[in-house]
Structure formats: structure tokens, C-alpha cells
Amino acid sequence: MDSRNPSLLRPHDSLLRPRDGDALRAELRHAAGLANVPVLFGGEVHDGTLHLTEFLGTRTNGLRGLAIPPSSGLGGRVVHQRRPASVPDYSSALSITHHYDRPVLGEGLRSILAVPVVVGGVSRAVLYAAVRECTPIGDRTAEAIVASCHRLAAEIAVRDEVDRRLQMLGALDVTRGAAPSAVSEGIRDAHAELRGLAQSVPDGPLRSRLRAVAEKLAGLAGDDGNDAGSAVGLSPRELDVLAHIALGCTNNEVAHRLSLKPETVKSYLRNAMGKLDAHSRHEAVVTARRLGLLP
């Protein structure tokens, strides 16, 4: 098992992590609206091998399901080198191997751009743009594919971090009795980081999932499952600030971690204290924990 690729460590039926292939397909569709090319396709990389699974504009099934090892063809080359590459005429290109001439040329593809999705120094997917003439891929198309790869890389990186935090939850049953204080501290740190991650991604399903995992952490750390905290109505940002205050962070440190101004942190903290009927930051944290809002 390759420890460099966190996606290989997760169960493929994880309810919290959707298939990365779905995100790849969404990026291909997004790029299709911007890129002036007839064919877009791509796939994920597992154990260093690229598996082509997603296609837009193809006429045959010759490319579907191809498994491309590192350095083989154009896709294997970009997986290995971790940077984009293109060929103006696939059939005569000297910079790549020609293991896949039959399916590529059978599809009629000539000029092809391949861009890797790199996360933590590892290629995790590849997106292609192709035309059926020997004309270079245009700058607009290249920029759209590269932008899609950057978005997909950011999405996968956040999903990996969620998986890492969930692995910490899986270890609780083993470590809870041995070192409860250390486990509690680890949960609180994970909770604060997840809330910070949630705010760093665009509003949408991924942010909701991150906050759901953070809430699960808070619930696991609670002693009695008290759900009275739902009546308090702290905003997501107030909880973000309070989660970091619970770690002992100063207002300036919270501001740095959450990319806020110190005055904004003070305002969120003041609002949270008012809703919790607390007279100090420490009392606010204690009350929030008692209500199950914080671990």
C-alpha cells in the first residue's frame, strides 16, 4: 500500500467521502463549457497507474478502461513528471511511447493536452483535452483545463484531510482508556482544524460535510449526549472562533488561523459569550462543551 496516496487508505464505500471520480467528472463538464475542444476525458491514478474512466465527446469505447502505467504514453508521462504536456500530432510524437496508438488513433485524436492533478507531490488524476486535427491546443483551453486540475487538487486535498481526521476517530476505542486526556486534546485539535478547513472551501456540499464531521467529533467527546446546544444557535463562525479559543489560542492567533481580523474575532467571541450567557471566554468554552457544541 502506497502511504503517499491517502485515497488508497480509505474505504471505497465511505459515506462521508464521495467518489473522487464524481468530482473529476464535474470538472470535465465545467471545463467543457470553457474549452473549445470536441473531446475531454480523464481518470484517477491508483498505485501510480492511470485509469481512464470519464469521457466527453468520444465516438468509440477504445479508450474506456485503459490502465496506463507511469511513463507510458502521454498520460503516463505526465503522471510521472507531475506537469502538463502536449503533443501536436500524437501519431508522430517522439516524446512519448506509442503503446496506445490503436485506441487513440481509432478515436481520431491527433493534438492532445494532458494535465495532472497533483496533491502533496503525487499525481492523483489526469485531465485531457483533444482535437481531431493537427492543430495546437489553444491557450484558453489549456488555461481552463489547468484551472480545473487546480480546483480538483484542492478538493481532493480537503477530502484527504477529512479522511485523516476520521482515522483518528477510529483509534478512539483503542486509546480512550489508556490516555483520555491526550485523546480529548486530539479531538479538540481535530475539531478546530476541521472547522477551519470548512471555512476555507467554497460554500457547498463539501463545507457541509466538513462541519458535519466536526459536529460528530463534538458529539463523541460529550459525556451525556446533551443536545440542548441546538437551542443556543451559535453561528458557524462563532463556533469556529470558540473552537480555537478552546485550544488556548489568543484572539490574534485565532485571527491568523481563520484568516480574520482580530477585531472580527472579538466580535464573534462577544456574540458567542452573549448567547451562552458567559462572562468570560473560559466560561463560554465550558458552557459550550456542556451543551455538546464543542468537544
Image (tube, helix red, strand yellow):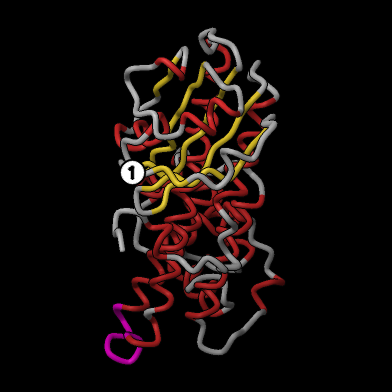
Percent coordinates x, y for residue 288 in the rendering: 54, 72
Identify the residue at image location x=47%, y=60%: 162
Q: Nearer the viewer, residue 159 or 110?
A: 110
> From the image, which quarter does the N terminus lie in?
bottom left
Q: Identify residue for label 1.
A: 122
Percent coordinates x, y for residue 37 in the rendering: 64, 18
112 to the left or right of 186 = right
228 to the left or right of 88 = right
Q: Nearer the viewer, residue 18 or 195?
A: 18
213 to the left or right of 122 = right
Indicate whether 283 appears above or below 116. Answer: below
Identify the residue at image location x=69%, y=64%: 233
Percent coordinates x, y for residue 199 in the rendering: 54, 47
State whether residue 100 appears in this view.
yes
Identify the residue at image location x=55%, y=47%: 65
Q: Nearer the viewer, residue 273 or 216?
A: 216
Magenta region: 175-182
Q: Which element type, helix, strand or loop, lies under badge 1?
A: strand
Indicate the quadrant where residue 135 lies. Answer: top right
191 to the left or right of 181 = right
Q: Is residue 177 magenta?
A: yes
Indicate whether 206 appears above or below 219. Answer: above
Percent coordinates x, y for residue 207 in the rendering: 60, 51
